Image (spheres, coloured by chain):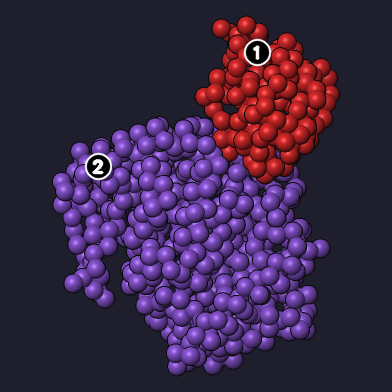
Amino acid sequence: MKKKINCHYWNPNLGLEDELEFNYQDIGNDIELKRPIYTKKSLEIIIESIKKARKEYLLKIELPKVFDIIEKVTNKWADPNYKGRKLALEVLPTVTGFSHEMIETWGFDHFMGILKRENLPLFGKLQPEKYKDFTNLSDGLVKAYGKKNITHSNYEPEVIGHICAGNILGISAFEMILDKLVDAATWIKVPSENPVFGALYAKSIEEVDPKLAQSIAIFPFDSKNKFVRDFLFSKSDIIRATGGEMARISLTKLSEEYKVPISGHWHKFSFITIAREYMDKRASQIAELVSLDVTAWDQQGCFSPQEIFVENGGKVDAQKFAELLSEEMETTSIALPKGINSGKMQVLDGYHQYLKKEMMGEPVKIFPSATHQWLVIFDGTTTRFEPSPLFRVIRVKPVNDIMEIPNLVRPIGSFLQTVGVAIPNERMIPFADAIGEAGATNIRAISSMTLQKPWEPWDGRFPLHELFEHDNIRWVSISTRDIDKEIEEALDRKRSIVDSRISSFIQRE
Amino acid sequence: MVKFPSDEWIKIFKEELNKSKEYEEVAKDWEGDFLFVITPDEELKSEVTFYVDLWHGKCRDAYIVDGEKTAAFIFKGPYSNWKKVINKELDPIRGLIRGMFTVEGDSKVILDQSKAAQELVNTASKIPVEFEGN
């Protein structure tokens, strides 16, 4: 008997399960995904029901209760014995292509663990004029760039729609929680690469507070389904969308057509910068941490590094660092193996492209994985930023000074996002000022590139603020005020993940 | 009926707050003074600022500010949003999160005192008021 997994969620009391027809997709491993075939009437009923739940419940409950619900849901997902988590772990590796270990450790234990009250972005609207220099916010720093120009404001959105990309597991959970903080009803289009998690998460909210869950609807549908897409757009006050270039073009057009504002988060590039001060006896620790950034989500996230710049002048040079990184990639990949979408071709392509250069005597050195799990390339031929083939293929490039990097990445400034850093505190602000000016938006300690703190801006906009106002201010954040402390903590975290995973791997073997 | 905003209103607010056992209980740990800044919009012509000194469940002082004044927290928003708060149509903490008000000072401290904020609003809403432009 195959396990049928719902990819949809709405108020179960609507009775639509009996009225609608469903598609069933066999994805292997005795799992079938169940998706509804919508009718106009069913969509109308669902949207009206989330609006009603907002009006009659969400707007009336006290805020501490909302916090309490969020806390309880987060605690459920942190519990390895929670039935929803067990089901997700059974299904998600097949559905998403990520390994069981990646989903369990990096997804449930770490990414979703940040969804706690003390981390939520509850500071409302910041005043950019007070953040002309990097200024304290939560445990980090932020700076406002640009001139205020308000193009949209609606402080009381009734329905917020979300179109989620499939490269990051928990994004739909983040969206559901943020919408409740701004008292909005929620619909979410879950990605075709991961149509399951959104419904499972909504179900976990239902288990804690059924009435709050009734303000949420999860819709799996193909992006080409114009009927559903247009209907949902027309019923929304604002849309937040994540996706690639195709999504940007089609959704921007739709936003104009329906005059519904859109907060888009599109294709981005991220990279790592390591200052010479860390290329001493700590170089192998830095390599340990960097290996986690390259490994996390198989490098599929917009915040995953595509290149590593290592500053010359330290005791360990860029080529030696590449070698150290390759050693750590092997260990980290045992702890957090690649998923079934291994990108083996991308790794081999990268290998052959650089093998030729290495054989021709160019300043190139390849550090390959015997099992094609990853590839580290030292490339001393150019400092120009080049996109990685991804799937754990990473280039290490030497630079004479980290302050050269802003100019190197400026040509792709509007596509820049996260910069993973190991830069001493005293050199951090000048670098952050310059890289922020070049276009990057998030500066994070290495190994935390894919762990966004909820207070941080996202692509230059605060995730709550952009739901009620678009003001053209671009915010740049530094995730910590003390890089060494953050690196120390990150090292403990990384070792606890890798050591425990490797111990269980050895026991299994 | 007293006019809102006015010096008369803030004096009554202070008296009512000091009579409230509910406020005294939920705000027993609160320490810190506020500037409540009401910014002009279509109905209010010029900015009005209330100074309110709250200390362990009591209001030690409250008046309209004439000139410069500083406080631990500055809670600021347009008149139309303050009206919603006084009429109990908007929770001030939710208003803060939704960007309808801004705060200077540690917003986390205020968020931890959401019950006290609720009682401030409950007290304010009991005073019969006449709004500008009505």
Would you say A479 lies left or right of A429 here?
A: left
Q: Which residue is mark 1?
A: B4
Residue B125 lies, with reference to residue A341, above or below; the image says: above
Would you say A508 lies left or right of B67 here?
A: left
Question: Which residue is at 41% across, 43% downward?
Answer: A212
Q: Nearer the viewer, residue A340 or A2?
A: A2
Question: Which residue is at 75% across, 62% downward?
Answer: A482
Q: If the image is split into quadrants, where does the N terminus of chain B sit?
A: top right
Same chain letter for marks 2 and 1: no
Chain letter, disc 1 residue: B
Under circle 1, the secondary element is strand
Return the mark for residue A345. none
Q: Position of residue B122 (x, y in %)?
A: 60, 24
Three-letter code for the amino acid on which mark 2 is drawn: Leu
**Shown colour of chain B:** red
Q: Which chain is purple?
A: A
Q: Which residue is mark 2?
A: A14
Q: If the image is split into quadrants, where does the C terminus of chain B sit?
A: top right
- Disc 1 crowd rating (10 Å Cα; few below 14, some 14-19, many 20+) is some
- Whole-number angstrom distance, CA of label 2 to CA of label 1: 45 Å
Residue A317 lies, with reference to residue A20, above or below; the image says: below
Chain letter, disc 2 residue: A
